[in-house]
Image (spheres, helix red, strand yellow):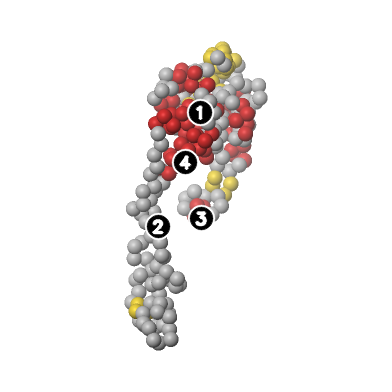
Amino acid sequence: MTKINVYGVDGSIKEKIELPEIFHTPYRPDIIRKSFNVLHSNKRQPYGADPLAGTRHATASAGKGRGLSRVPRLTQGRRAALAPGTVGGRRAHPPKSERNWKEKINKKEKLLARNSALAATADKELVSRRGHRFDENITLPVVIEDDFEKIKKTKEVINIFQKIGIYDDIIRSVEGRHIRAGRGKLRGRKYRVPKSILIISTKKDVEKSSGNLSGVDVTQPDQLNIEHLAPGGDAGRLTVFTKSALAKLGGIQEE
């Protein structure tokens, strides 16, 4: 069994504990990617064109025998309209709002993906490959004593992360914030922010002290999903557990 450090809020090593069996799940990037794609597909909002788009014209075809193409034309002019190949005409095969974007995944595959992504948080090579920055001397995943759940100020959380050696990852997220390419910047999502630390705690109050840090996500053991553990479908996120959250996670391995 693998032993890891439990860090105090002062950054010191309080004790060593064994990782739950769930962290020995084999690494399966193919199943992780599949589960992530299914989750994103099921979150899509259906969209489609107006069924009457491009058809709101008074048009008529000249018919045969006049030396003109038979494309529909405006009755009050000679400009072509309505047909898919014309300027301002309808689309031949527009997206339809009734399309079903839902996808399915087997329960055992979904469970394997979550457990495999969880195990990847303990692999320093995978965490480094995702671009996370941390002190090479710490053990992964980072486990902090339960006093961390009582902290209410963001500056205290920053101080703890600096002492442990993982605050550089939040700096990486701050420096990586950039304007999105494409139309998304006109639709309320102008900036892209790299993901940094994932905090897993049994108390929801941690979100008040930590949720405002750049790229940080806060969740509870029973609410973990593949989007938390493998953003973009790439496993190996830098993760912080409270000691009680890690213990609880060992009990939900088969759920």
Q: CA distance from mark 4 to mark 2?
A: 20 Å
Residue closest to the far front: 65
4 or 1: tag closer to the N-terminus: 4
Residue named by callout 1:
116
3 or 2: tag closer to the N-terminus: 2
Residue closest to the far top: 15
Residue kind at label 2, given as amino acid type? Pro
Q: Residue at x 40, y 60 (%)?
A: 94
1 or 2: tag closer to the N-terminus: 2
User: What is the secondary structure assignment of the residue under circle 1?
Assistant: helix
Residue named by callout 3:
183
Residue 15 vs residue 67, the one in the foreground: 67
User: What is the secondary structure assignment of the residue under circle 4?
Assistant: helix
Figure check: 20 above or below 226: above
4 or 2: tag closer to the N-terminus: 4
Residue 135 visible? The answer is yes
The x, y position of residue 27, in whole percent, is 54, 28
Horizontal relation, residue 28 to residue 71: left or right: right
Horizontal relation, residue 140 to residue 249: left or right: right
Crowdedness of circle 2 by 10 Å Cα count: few (<14), some, many (20+)?
some
Residue closest to the far right: 136
Q: CA distance from mark 1 to mark 2?
A: 36 Å
Which label lies toward us, 3 or 1? 1
Crowdedness of circle 4 by 10 Å Cα count: few (<14), some, many (20+)?
some
Residue named by callout 2:
95
User: What is the secondary structure assignment of the residue under circle 2?
Assistant: loop
The x, y position of residue 141, in whole percent, is 55, 23
Residue named by callout 4:
37
Which of the 4 quarters of the picture holds residue 251? Answer: top left
